[in-house]
Amino acid sequence: MTANSNDTLRDPWLVAAFEGWNDAADASSDVIAHLIDEWDAEVYAEFDGDDYYDFQETRPIIRGADDARRIDWPTPTVYLARPPHGDRDVLLLRAPEPHLRWRAFTRAILELATMSGVRDIVCLGALLADTPHTRTVPLTGSSTSPVIAEKLAVASSAYSGPVGITGVVAHEAAVGGFGSTSLWAAVPHYLAEPPCPKATFALLGALEDTLGTPLPAGELGELAAAWQRGADEIAQQDIEIAEYVQSLEEEHDAGNTPESSGDAIAREFERYLRRRDLGS
């Protein structure tokens, strides 16, 4: 691991997302990419991909032309962002899910967090689910912080089964004494091709509630609306999909869904006010 230890950080958060199994339609890793871009985040640390990847599974990419050609290797990278509207810095980790040495990989992340003065870690994920694209994106989550858990008011996950690196990092962070929060968005399985800006936008809102500071939305709202229109067109052009979506809507509307509650609407209005003040 190489890190820029010369930076003095302001009580930083660590926010992580991992491409692959835990990242349906790239919805969670796109949150990280979005914030890196919006905040002009700079590289803070890199992990040696040789330790964690099978390059026959996640292959390096050659880019450029003539003498400028280079090979980009899969490299877990942490970016440092200094939000202008907030008193805490944010470390943003984006990486492909590793193939090898998950426990060593997780230890390396937590060691970097300790070295950097991180107290709170947030892991983002996205999964494919039987959810209609016409409704609010279902969010689930959990937090070791009672304050954050109450503030989020998202459904708690009772999942039991195989786990990805997102779950491992969140669990080990909690065991290691960090404040550990997990946020997950559900992506309609019949619209699994990336990107899914509607799910990314929903995760960004939940992350904003967690950090307690306004996050720049940029063009995500417009992209989410455009995705919604495209999904509606797909459903209108295929009667089988239309009938299936209708059945999902009926099942969704019959349930007690926290994302459609008055509290959720109030939280969305509060986000709107924060982003308006931010100038997004």
Image: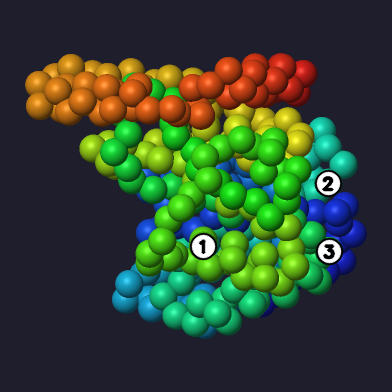
Quadrant position of the C terminus in the picture: top right
Per the model, the C-alpha gap separating discs 2 and 1 is 25 Å
User: Residue at 33% of width from left, 23% of height from top?
Assistant: 254
Q: Disc 2, disc 1: CB below 8 Å? A: no
User: Residue at 38% of width from left, 76% of height from top?
Assistant: 55
Q: Position of residue 277 (x, y in %)?
A: 77, 18
Residue pointed to by mark 2: 88
Which amino acid type corresponds to the residue marked 1 in the rendered image? Gly
User: Residue at 45% of width from left, 80% of height from top?
Assistant: 100
First in sequence, mark 1 or 3: give its number.
3
Per the model, the C-alpha gap separating discs 1 and 3 is 22 Å
- For residue 117, the mark is 3
Q: Nearer the viewer, mark 2 or mark 1?
A: 1
Q: Nearer the viewer, mark 1 or mark 3?
A: 1
Which amino acid type corresponds to the residue marked 2 in the rendered image? Arg
Classify mark 1: helix, strand or loop: helix
Per the model, the C-alpha gap separating discs 2 and 3 is 11 Å
Classify mark 2: helix, strand or loop: loop
Crowd rating for badge 3 (residues with CA inside 10 Å; few <14, some 14–19, many 20+): some
Q: Position of residue 125 (x, y in %)?
A: 49, 50
In this picture, residue 202 sits left or right of residue 152? left
- Can residue 279 be seen? no
Q: Position of residue 187 (x, y in %)?
A: 37, 39
Q: Position of residue 46 (x, y in %)?
A: 64, 69
- For residue 167, the mark is 1
User: Residue at 69% of width from left, 38% of height from top?
Assistant: 150
Which amino acid type corresponds to the residue marked 3 in the rendered image? Gly
Quadrant position of the N terminus in the picture: bottom right
- The image shows residue 178, relative to residue 108, as above or below, that is above
Crowd rating for badge 2 (residues with CA inside 10 Å; few <14, some 14–19, many 20+): some
